[in-house]
Amino acid sequence: MVKAAGKSSIGATNSPDEIGSFSTRFSLPSFLKQVKRLTDHQSEALQKTGFGNLLSIPNQRLNKSLLDELMRRWDTNKQAFVLPRGEISLNLMDIALILRLRVVGPPVSLVNSIPFGDLERDYGAVIWKRKITVTSLESKLNSFGDLCSDEFVITFLMYTFGTFLFPNANGTVDSRLLSYIQDVDNIRRFSWGEAVLKDVCNWLDQRKMKSVKYVGGCLLFLQIWSFEHIDIARPALLGSSVSFPRVFKWDKSKLHSKQQIMSQFKSLHNDQVTQELQLTSWESEIDIIKELLEAQSNEKEHSEVENSCVNSPIVIDCESEVDTIKELLEAHSNGKEHSEAENSCVNSPIVIVCDFGATPQMMSPIIIEVKSVSKIIHKKPKLIRSASQNDANTIITIGEEKDLRRRVKMLEEKIMELQKENVELMGENDELRKDNKLLRLSSDNLVFRLEKLLLDEDHC
């Protein structure tokens, strides 16, 4: 923690660090104080949750001049830091390399739909204010002594969230986090690193847009990220044999004046910025890094498939245009060679939407998607329009020719079946009209007779 001139360092969890142009309740010293009190048994239990590596983080002081200048350069629209010679953003690989937190898995989402549980009530939260004070967590943690239990693990992690990973502006922790850690055996399966990254970005947004005085989030991650990516105010490397996660690599940050930091940023050169961190061979074998690389590879492949044809689909409306569909299939068969010649990226796909009218038995529209063929487009120009999101609920993608014809046959049968139902409904409608006419006649006749009876009685 940075020391103010003429003042003692701040050790209390809820006392903000007032140095610099922003304040924060991020408190690595408070977290490390509790780490030092852990027994071997308690440390082993925490190791199993996926947060065990945090227990070995060396003490660091925040370089608030550096952090403040970074915050000034944050662009909320680009979600990146704007430097004199380009932009650079935070990413999942950064969080995985720096803190060794998992970034693949079910997300940690604090939505209002999470039920308010007894565990939240036990920790002092109420349904209209789902917050737990860090002070109460600290007191509860101190009461365990050497005891190691699930409750201890949960309390320690909530304290870690409030002081280190997700600190906020008012010294509290969101009690909805309890729903993700109440089953201690499944804590590590969630994407905690992704949650930390999003929280940091959220605080950067608030600082930029609202000029908030108190800045939360894991500021140590942001500082180490700066050391890794930008050659400004870097401390010395520790030279330890343990260099992963990368937060272990760096010595304590030295103090720099705001003017020094601003000047260094203004004169920043390209060779002082590392856009993407390069993995060492050893890091590439770490489980959380391997699963992230695999996820990125799968996402890239999926994106390439989606972008293989970049044009928007063309939609052809049809009620009984089965002949048009047949022509499309013939053209599709004849155009295989043409599409291969264009690297399998032909023109916009044609989507045929068959909506059979708003009958009482109306079904969802059926969509058949095929690769576009220009001669069909020109032949049926009046049927062409742009695709919309409401075009269908059921999508059938054309594959082999035999399968195409089978699907068309099914479509013909469905059209015939619906047309038959439509004829039957029209017949029923005619019958209802006749019945209605008869009822109307009967009603008129009844009224006439009643009026006649009333008139006869008056004469009598």
Image (tube, helix red, strand yellow):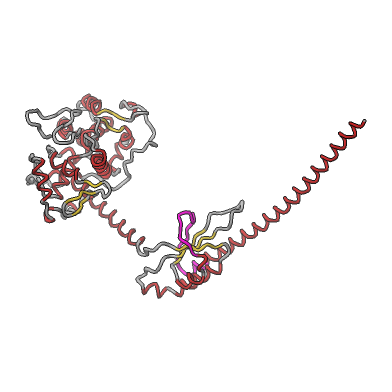
- Looking at the picture, how far across and down is residue 72, in whole percent? 19, 43
Q: Within the image, what quadrant is residue 69 found in?
A: top left
> Is residue 279 shown to the viewer in this render?
no
Asked whether residue 229 is drawn in magenta, I would say no
- Looking at the picture, how far across and down is residue 270, in whole percent? 13, 56
Residue 347 against residue 359 in the figure, above or below: below
| 250 lies left or right of 49 | left
Between 350 and 131, the one lying in front of the other is 350
| 82 lies left or right of 379 | left
Residue at the far front: name it: 459
Residue 409 against residue 391 in the figure, above or below: below
Q: How many labels does the image show?
A: 0
Residue at the far right: name it: 460
| 225 lies left or right of 375 | left
Q: Within the image, what quadrant is residue 415 found in?
A: bottom right
- Looking at the picture, how far across and down is residue 313, in whole percent? 43, 62
Q: The C terminus is located in which quarter?
A: top right
Q: Which residues make up the magenta segment?
A: 384-405
User: Which residue is at a point 20% across and 52% down the rendered structure image?
Assistant: 87
- Looking at the picture, how far across and down is residue 115, in whole percent? 39, 34
Asked whether residue 401 is drawn in magenta, I would say yes
Q: The N terminus is located in which quarter?
A: top left
Between 326 and 264, the one lying in front of the other is 264
> Is residue 115 shown to the viewer in this render?
yes
